[in-house]
Image: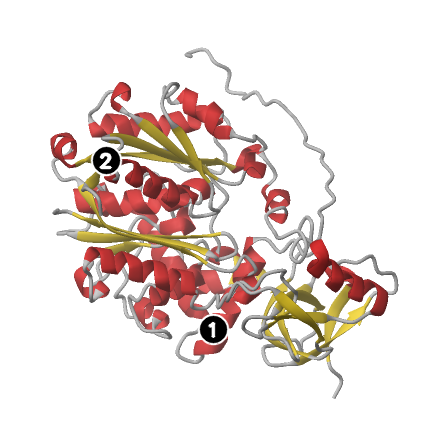
């Protein structure tokens, strides 16, 4: 339309929605172990024997059902890392910090977590988890991983 | 394949950080009208529509297909929506191809769009993760690809270096200057990229795609109609789509199996044995510069570890033996739900001879690639100028 204003119109809105996701027994068992015992569990597949950390109720490799729990770690190896220098909305920690992929001892899969911005955090370094004092049954009950003191 | 089908018309909007002048259906309609016009048909010739767009949370409208479908003048036609992360646009094209190749419909429209400016992307991205393991970390795209790139560089050092990513950014941002639809067009140097502010190591600001609003569309027709609609239709010669673990740490992000497999499926269908010799150009989905190196290898266009050499030697430059992303790629515009389709449109236009200022000479076969999710979805589409 020829005489339309240069200023554009917007209609403001917001969606607010809360959720409570059922975890199921396997995911629930892992989270309970974090909260109540401060240990990290892997789930062993009854079909191919792979130990998944974090666990899945089904094996994505062979389709088998999870058979047993195995305590894994606490030590793990950093397989990849990315340093975040600037704060962003929804960041898990105050920046600067690092994301890592960690392969825990006894696990066949890696997990995503965070570390402080420590120069020692590089591919191949051994790390150990630090648990929070107050735990709620979430992956973030592990506060972060830190390089193991030699 | 059941029966032959080709892209006979394409349409794109100019990609921009904000398109405040239109609402979502109007944006989609802009691209759709151009595709219909390019195909030289009437909107009533369309028999079915497939719509691809990002996760509903990006724009905050659930079931947007109903809203958008009617704006395209397609009330009364079958409307299908495809949502597979960054591969949504490409998946929409592939679904539209199935509609025609199956014999159910003769002429189908595929449309894809994204209007990130209507929402808050950083918040939306945090909701895409698995609620149990990833949501607490809200890693989003850049940190995820930072982890991917770190893994890739560590594996292939010293053959591949961080500045190889910078070379991709320089190449593609310059190529974009010949693409009238591109959002970011700039002449920069490797030093500019290496000195740009760090985002999530090794990714820096100039290694990143922009946030974009935009839409793209194409018309697919069966053989007899296609030959009337386009002087040089872009025939679907090969297709491959694959997915793998929804948990990124379980994927070998430096050489993802879903990408390798999708490419193999497409090459098999197209009877291609030596991709880099038998194809003339590739449009691949490099949301971040290092990904162009990684996908070049996973698509079998070079051996693992040779991604750096491909860009450094100039092989993948506009004037090189195997140009990659002559359009400027995703680094130059990323309306997420549409980007996979834009790669297909660019690859199709090269075969059709319609790529304008960034047209390469003598293109007989082209490849379009896309990835999505936490690197777990991949698609590969191959177009040929002859049946």
Q: Position of residue B27 (x, y in %)?
A: 43, 28
Residue in the picture at 42% in, 25% down: B69
Residue in the picture at 33% in, 41% down: B93
In the image, is residue A131 above or below residue B224?
below
Q: Which residue is mark 2?
A: B103
As drawn, the label of residue B153 is: 1
* Residue at the limit of the structure toward the bottom, as seen here: A150
Q: Is residue B1 left or right of residue B79?
A: left
Q: Position of residue B196 (x, y in %)?
A: 52, 59
Same-chain check, marks 2 and 1: yes
Give the quarter of the image for residue A55. Answer: bottom right
Residue in the picture at 57% in, 20% down: A9
Mark 2 chain: B
Depth check, front residue: A32 or B309: A32
Looking at the image, is mark 2 or mark 1 nearer the viewer?
2
CA distance for labels 2 and 1: 46 Å
Q: Position of residue B59 (x, y in %)?
A: 56, 34
In the image, is residue B18 above or below residue A8?
below
């Amino acid at each position: 339309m020829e005489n339309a204003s240069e200023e554009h119109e917007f209609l403001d809105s917001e969606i607010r929605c809360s959720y409570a996701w059922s975890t199921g027994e396997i995911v629930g068992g892992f989270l309970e172990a974090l909260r109540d015992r401060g240990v990290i569990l892997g789930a062993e597949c009854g079909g191919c024997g792979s130990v998944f950390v974090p666990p899945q109720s089904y094996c994505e490799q062979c389709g088998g059902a999870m058979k047993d729990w195995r305590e894994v770690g606490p030590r793990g190896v950093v397989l990849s890392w990315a340093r975040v220098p600037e704060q962003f909305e929804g960041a898990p920690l105050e920046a600067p910090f690092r994301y890592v992929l960690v392969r825990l001892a006894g696990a066949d899969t890696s997990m995503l977590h965070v570390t402080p911005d420590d120069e020692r955090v590089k591919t191949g370094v051994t790390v150990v988890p630090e648990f929070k004092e107050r735990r709620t049954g979430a992956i973030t009950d592990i506060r972060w991983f830190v390089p193991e003191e030699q | 394949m059941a029966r032959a089908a080709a892209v006979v018309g394409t349409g794109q909007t100019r990609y921009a950080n904000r398109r405040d002048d239109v609402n979502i259906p109007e944006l989609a309609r802009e691209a759709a009208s151009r595709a219909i016009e390019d195909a030289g048909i009437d909107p009533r010739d369309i028999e079915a529509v497939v719509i691809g767009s990002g996760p509903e949370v990006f724009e905050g409208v659930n079931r947007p297909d109903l809203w958008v479908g009617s704006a395209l003048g397609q009330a009364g036609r079958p409307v299908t929506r495809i949502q597979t992360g960054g591969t949504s646009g490409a998946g929409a094209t592939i679904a539209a191809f199935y509609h025609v190749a199956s014999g159910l419909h003769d002429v189908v429209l595929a449309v894809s769009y994204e209007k990130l400016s209507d929402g808050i992307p950083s918040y939306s991205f945090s909701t895409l993760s698995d609620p149990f393991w990833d949501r607490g970390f809200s890693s989003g795209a850049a940190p995820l690809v930072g982890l991917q790139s770190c893994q890739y560089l560590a594996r292939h050092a010293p053959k591949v270096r961080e500045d190889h990513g910078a070379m991709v950014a320089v190449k593609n941002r310059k190529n974009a200057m010949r693409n009238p639809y591109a959002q970011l067009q700039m002449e920069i140097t490797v030093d500019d990229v290496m000195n740009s502010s760090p985002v999530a190591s090794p990714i820096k600001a100039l290694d990143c795609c922009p946030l974009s609003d935009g839409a793209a569309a194409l018309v697919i027709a069966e053989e007899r109609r296609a030959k009337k609609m386009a002087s040089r239709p872009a025939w679907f010669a090969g297709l491959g789509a694959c997915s793998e673990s929804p948990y990124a740490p379980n994927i070998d992000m430096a050489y993802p199996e879903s990408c390798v497999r999708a490419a193999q499926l497409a090459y098999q269908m197209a009877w291609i044995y030596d991709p880099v010799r038998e194809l003339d150009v590739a449009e691949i989905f490099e949301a971040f510069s290092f990904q162009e190196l990684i996908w070049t290898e996973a698509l079998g266009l070079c051996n693992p570890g040779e991604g750096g050499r491909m860009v450094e030697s100039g092989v993948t430059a506009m004037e090189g033996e195997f140009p990659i992303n002559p359009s400027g790629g995703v680094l130059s515009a990323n309306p997420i739900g549409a980007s996979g389709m834009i790669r297909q449109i660019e690859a199709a236009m090269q075969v059709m001879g319609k790529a304008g200022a960034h047209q390469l000479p003598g293109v007989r076969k082209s490849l379009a690639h896309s990835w999505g999710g936490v690197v777990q979805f991949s698609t590969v589409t191959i177009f040929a100028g002859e049946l």
